[in-house]
Amino acid sequence: MRTLILVFAFIICFPCLVQANTCSISSSGMAFIYLTDNPSPTDSTGTITTVCDNGTSHTVSLSTGNSGSYTSRTMTAPGGGTLSYQIYQNAGRTAKAGDGTGGSVTRSIVGSATATIYGRIPALQNAIPGSYSDTLVVTISF
């Protein structure tokens, strides 16, 4: 029997508008449709956009979310279910997006840029049906 699980990974900008050096940051969330019997991982993408005047150099980092670890991020469902996932900086999904600790990497940018972030839910997890979510904080430092 196939089970359909809708999953949303929300990314919150903190702070979404940075007044110093006239920089701002925005992001789009990721949506996954995960089937428990699919033998392949489920992938999704989102974006993080930073706009800084005068070519300001800055670093973008992501939090761990609910899991508290970059090793394996975890989405949760209201009924208590969990679903492991990861956010990466590259399409090959080898560089975990984070704050530079725990095997994660940050992104350094000069001026303005829109960066794609890549999400993946590993296949064949024993998850209960439901809606799963996690909240990540995006931080811009300059």
Image: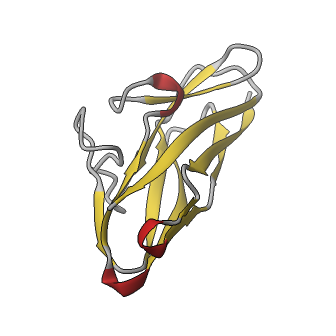
Q: Is residue 102 left or right of residue 10?
A: left
For the residue pair 87 and 100, the one nearer the viewer reads as: 100
Question: Looking at the image, which residue is at 51% across and 38% down?
Answer: 39
Question: Looking at the image, which residue is at 22% across and 37% down?
Answer: 103
The percent coordinates of residue 42 (x first, y second) are 54, 46
Image quarter for residue 55?
bottom left
In which quadrant is the N terminus drawn?
A: top right
Question: Looking at the image, which residue is at 66% across and 35% down?
Answer: 133
For the residue pair 60 and 116, the one nearer the viewer reads as: 60
Task: Please identify the residue farthest to the front as the structure is shown.
Answer: 20
Q: Is residue 129 left or right of residue 23?
A: right
Q: Is residue 98 left or right of residue 66?
A: left
Question: Looking at the image, which residue is at 49% across and 35% down?
Answer: 123
Task: Please identify the residue farthest to the bottom as the structure is shown.
Answer: 54
- Residue 22 visible from this viewpoint: yes
- Residue 2 visible from this viewpoint: no
Image quarter for residue 71?
top left
